[in-house]
Image (tube, rainbow, N blue to C red):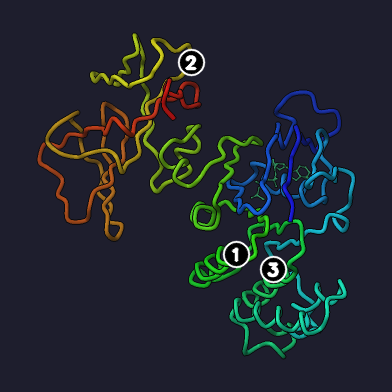
Amino acid sequence: MARINLKDIRHAYMDNPTSDDDYALKRVDHVFEDGGAYALLGPSGCGKTTLLNIISGLLRPSEGAIHFGTVDVTDLPTEARNIAQVFQFPVVYDTMTVYDNLAFPLRNRGVAEDVVDRRVREIIGMIGLEDRARRKAQGLTADEKQKISLGRGLARADVNAILFDEPLTVIDPHMKWALRTQLKELHRRFGHTMVYVTHDQTEALTFADTVVVMYEGEIVQIGTPEELFERPRHTFVGYFIGSPGMNLLPAAMDGGIVRIGGQSFALPGMPQRLSAKRIELGIRPEFVRLGREGMPVSIAKVEDVGRKKIVHADLEGETIAVVIDEDSEVPAEPCVAFDPAHLNLYADSWRVEPEGRP
Ligand SMILES: Nc1ncnc2c1ncn2[C@@H]1O[C@H](COP(=O)(O)OP(=O)(O)OP(=O)(O)O)[C@@H](O)[C@H]1O
């Protein structure tokens, strides 16, 4: 296992990049701690796979260096980095049995056959393929083959890190949940450094202790699932995490007072003035109260989503989402009020950090 240190990494796929926009990765300076479970989360094209390929050695960064522990691996090929990788689509030996596929990475390293057997049995149980152990991979479903790929990635105990690139794409939704839980359990037991790429927030938030959110080639926030929910550092995180995402309302600020429409909010720890082109007030739909007091709204739509309802309303020309319990009623003359403890202020998309508070 190893601590992975990405030192001032930038990457451009084109020759002679000139502006920031020419870089698929603008600048990444970050440490993945030894034994941590990390998710790289972000929309398509934000640079997740580029970053993962730099860690695995499939790609050499245009600038910067990468260290595994104390070793500079920037110029080392993948084979020399001692990592396991699981890709989006199955990589299995069709003519080998499920058992031999899982044993392969261990036998390849000369691990004693009794240790191989113990480990392979453990992994086969974990991926739920006990009854297929002696069958050739050929003829298995894509779903089953991907479980073999996952199992192969987990087989060796002595790797520096295990890298997963959207590994559950071909797995059916029910099994996804089970495998994610097992991966987490495995992480707890063996303590591998794991980096897991996904564009699915549920996958990221349930798998990882720390989520690295990427947007347009940059890391916009690194935090626990709670931090990303409570205090999104960037409006993109507010919008991307949560279902529905955070409400962002155009605001003005003067003398430390934030205004939206006719309403004023005194937020503790805010500067007196902000020199930003765009100021927004962010509040999660879960922290908006719908009742008879506050700012009047008109209701556009009410969605029933199981145990909750999502109310979409119009507040002074802006659409706002509110989450209420399924048995709550929408009042005749509805108003919204914001829980001040959960208000976030954004200047040009970045959170204004209150002085003396997190
Ligand atoms: N081989 C390549 N040559 C040129 N541009 C590339 C190459 N690979 C990726 N890119 C570009 O780099 C940017 C980042 O791509 P990357 O695949 O890292 O994003 P991603 O977040 O992993 O997206 P996805 O989830 O769709 O795989 C994108 O604009 C993409 O078009």
- Say whether residue 48 is left or right of residue 271: right
Q: Are marks 3 and 2 in contact (CB under 8 Å)?
A: no
Q: Residue at x 38, y 19 (%)?
A: 269
**SS at mark 2 in the image:** loop
- Comparing 122 with 248, the one in front is 122
Mark 1, secondary structure of its residue:
loop
> Vertically, is 130 above or below 193?
below
Corner quadrant of residue 80: bottom right
Q: Amino acid at mark 1?
A: Leu
Percent of width and height locating residue 276: 48, 15
Q: In the rendered image, which quarter is residue 102 located in? A: bottom right
- The percent position of residue 286, horizontal first and vertical second, equals 31, 44
State left or right for residue 134 relative to residue 185. right
Cα–Cα gap, marks 3 and 2: 49 Å
Q: Amino acid at mark 2?
A: Lys
Q: Residue furthest left?
A: 332
Q: Looking at the picture, tell me which residue is in the foreground, 277 or 342.
A: 342
Ligand 1 closer than 8 Å to the CB at disc 1?
A: no
Q: Earlier in the sequence, mark 3 or mark 2?
A: 3
* Residue matched to label 1: 168
> Which residue is the site of mark 3?
154
Residue denoted by label 2: 277
